[in-house]
Image (spheres, rainbow, N blue to C red):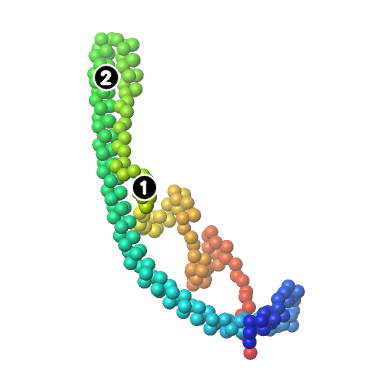
Amino acid sequence: MEEKDLQKEIQKFEGRSDAMVISDQPSYELAGEYVVALDGLLKKIRNYWEEPIKKAHETHKALTRKRAEMCNPVEAERKKTSRKVSEYLTEQDRIRREEQRKLDEQRRKEEKKEQAKLDAQIDRAKESGKKDKVKDLEQEKKDVFVPPAVVEPTVEKTTRTETATVTAKQDLEIEIVDINKVLSHIVSGTLPNTIVTVSIPKLKQVIKLHGLDRLDGVVIQRVSKGQFRGK
């Protein structure tokens, strides 16, 4: 049998189900016979393509294996180098953040020191009964502000060479250690439910296993389906 012969058989069946009405036992039986006939045609089609697909699959596996053999050492080198770049950038960022923390702490100390000086002046002004000066000094205390110093990154965000461009990008590495706690955050609304996907086939298995007819958040419908087998 050739492909054109199969196409002719397919054309004989196309569209016949559109006019089909199952309203009694005879029409139900005819529908069953029709499905079995379709199954027979499907078997012919699958048998026809089985060998070409098998050969194509074997060729695909061989080519994929050869590609992997060539790519693997290159990918390993890239991975090791990228990891070293990441370690360098992460360490430089840690150093920058530590320097920034020290500068911020020093700035807060200077602000507190200045405010302490003003507190002493306020106390003396109160002892002298100088209410207007007390008011001015209290406002001055509220306005105390030491401009923050910003530690600039030692590595430029984008570095260009003659043959490459490297861009430093901040990212996160996340490991889930307690799935139940993560789910509790979703239930409470802290995290959106779009970060999880429920497996419908696995959920169906659980519902069948426990014989559930009702489950909050799930619509369960009993559906009858036909199973077809030729004689």
Q: Amino acid at mark 2?
A: Leu
Quadrant of the image occupied by residue 214: bottom right
27, 194: nearer the viewer: 194
> SS at mark 1?
strand
Work out whether residue 132 or residue 67 is closer to the camera in this orientation and state it: 67
Q: Residue at the location (35% across, 46% down)?
A: 159
| Residue 28 can be seen, yes or no | no
Q: Residue at x 60, y 70 (%)?
A: 222
Q: Which residue is mark 2?
A: 118
Place residue 94 in its image quadrant. top left
Badge 2 marks a residue whose secondary structure is helix
| Residue 158 x, y percent position in the rendering | 37, 45
User: Is 229 situated left or right of 169 in this image?
Assistant: right
Q: Nearer the viewer, residue 53 or 69?
A: 69
Whichever of labels 1 and 2 marks the residue nearer the N terminus, that label is 2
Quadrant, the N terminus:
bottom right
- Determine the residue positioned at 34% across, 43% down: 156
| Badge number at residue 160 | 1
Is the C-beta separation of discs 1 and 2 under 8 Å? no
Task: Reply above or below: 229 against 76.
Answer: below
